[in-house]
Image: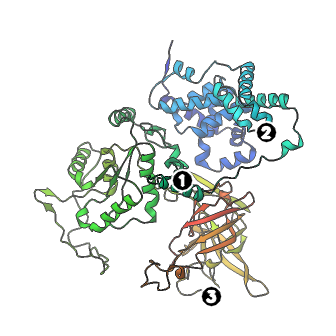
Amino acid sequence: MSVCVNVSVCECEHYGSSGVSALAALDSLSLFTDLGLSQRKARKTLKNQALSAQPCEVATQAQQTLGSTIDKATGTLLYGVASRLRDTRCFSFLVSYIASKKIHTEPQLSAALEYVQNHPLDRIDTADFEQECDVGVSVTPEQIEEAVEAAINRHWPQLLVERYRFNMALLMGEARAVLKRADGKMIENKVDMQVLHLLGPKMEADLEKKPKVAKARLEETNWRTAKDVIENGETADQTLALMEQLPGKPLKFHKPGENYKTPGYVITPHTMNLLKQHLEVTGGQVRTQFPPEPSGILHIGHAKGINFNFGYAKANNGICFLRFDDINPKKEEAQFSTAIYDMEAWLGYTSYKVTYPCDYFDLLYAWAVELIHSILAYAVRKGKFSEGEATLWVKLVMEDGRWTLIHHTTTQGTKWCIYPTYDYTHCLCSTLFLLLVLQCTGCLLPSMAVLESLCIIITSLPAAKSLDIQVPNVPADETKDFHPVPFALIVFIERTDFKEEPKPGFKHLAWGQPVCLRHTGYVIELQHVVKGPNGCVESLEVTCRRADAGEKPKAFIHWVSQPLMCEVRLYERLFQHKNPEDPTEVPGEFLSDLNLASLCVVEAALVDCSVALAKPFDEFQCKRLGYFSVDPDSGKGKLVFNRTVTLKEDPGKV
């Protein structure tokens, strides 16, 4: 018999309220260690209030069923629920299955989480849920042994040749494909035992690393491919698959109609029905858009957007709209639209349709009226300023071809001249075109780095000798997640942020001029300058106070404490002139215009420890320095960063 369980918000609030009261009487650290976390990781997690709330709730609910002791295997599964499931409404339902051992393996948990995500609003059919998660289905050691033996037999010749240098993960993967709900550790143990029985103990030759097969250089491969194609009378095409050019997050995008799987996606009672209607109309087609503003030519900042939106659609046999994001295109110059068309064609893309928001003004206006009638929006009818009381001063560039002002017209024919805002137009026009996803550039993880360091010794820290500062991951919204950065008595700042004899306009650290250390809430003031035998400043001794305990400082500066040493490569323009091939600008041809200082390598830069686990091509925004990407040259002992985009120079650093 099939039984439906309604894991509603009310049920979860019941568990949550009792969990909060129980949590007050429990040691939070022991809660986290019960979930299988080490003491160090538990303390680190507890310092992040946003990150620790869900594990605390899950652990508290589990203890209501299991008591104060939770075995390690169960704790690991519970932590998996807390860290991988955003929707807390299903916590109590999943915790009950884990606590009762109905879900006792990682594959079962993965299936349970996928089931819950695929049914965000439905009542959970327990029979269907248990069937999908193989509840009550046990995999015997004999079944695992048979699956492993079959995998070994398929690769027996290669295994005999390569012995222990053979990729054993291949055997485990094939066995797991047959027994999807089998415990991974048991499969690994069976593989080790059977391989040992067949090959015997490892010999000295087995300890040597497997020689790497040299790969042809990418440029050479592409050149040969293009040459072969041309010789056969065909047109050379791209040699790399489009999906290979879109690594990382684009590969993890949800399928059409599965928007609800995106973390943070708002789900309403109508969401699933609307997504179903979307699929019926589009047939599951991938639909994207590239929305540039026709107020100038495309620049490097558009590269990511145009290549991703067109490339992702093409790789999935979809379509991409080119939308000129302007509510009044008649005031724009035609040359910019033409330049955007040319750039699109030059990159080898063809838009499905070109659209302008102004084509839909009547519909946007009608929707605005509907929002007002539904009491979901309002129109301002009583102004705060009378006509003539407020004056708008306009900055004009005399060389600009569009600087002539036109008298404001309130009506055009029988209609009011009402222009929708960007935020209002952007989402509604995208809905009209039934787009799969609106891909906007997000915020990179902020970090702090110092290129030319100056040691700062704090002589009076109003708190402990060392503490962790919570740095927001999204600077514009401090309600989002945080990451900890250590703050101790010794910190390092940029040498250019200190001047003994500052020039007028210098706002950073100087005698009688304190500064605030960003994110800390502490202000430092110069107390003593320590110089070396050559007269160079080696370190500074400063006093420290809370920012709210005195006069507000003029500036905030970045810093690092207990940092990692890294190499930073600063790239500048390769040529000194905008058009190096123009003989009127560069008479000596473009090679004479090379910028010999286009690359500056800082071998002993300092960066905060939040980037310690960074992998090649990970991206970061370093405060006041620019945007950086991890270079593949990075090794275990030292990270290497490439600056990809610079920032405007701080006018206060003179």
Residue denoted by label 2: 162
Spot occupied by residue 608 in the image (x, y as percentages of width and height): 66, 62
Q: Quadrant of the C terminus?
A: bottom right
Residue denoted by label 3: 501
Q: Which mark is residue 188?
A: none
Disc 1 is placed on an element classified as helix
Judged from this view, the residue extending furthest toward the top is 1
Disc 2 is placed on an element classified as helix
* Earlier-in-chain disc, 1 versus 3: 1
Mark toward the viewer: 1 or 3: 1
Q: Amino acid at mark 3?
A: Glu
**Residue at image x 60%, y 21%?**
134
**Residue situated in front as seen by the camera: 404 or 279:** 279
Whether residue 595 is situated above or below residue 641 in the rendered picture: below
* Earlier-in-chain disc, 2 versus 1: 2
- Using the numbered discs, state the Cα–Cα distance from disc 1 to disc 3 in whole angstroms: 62 Å
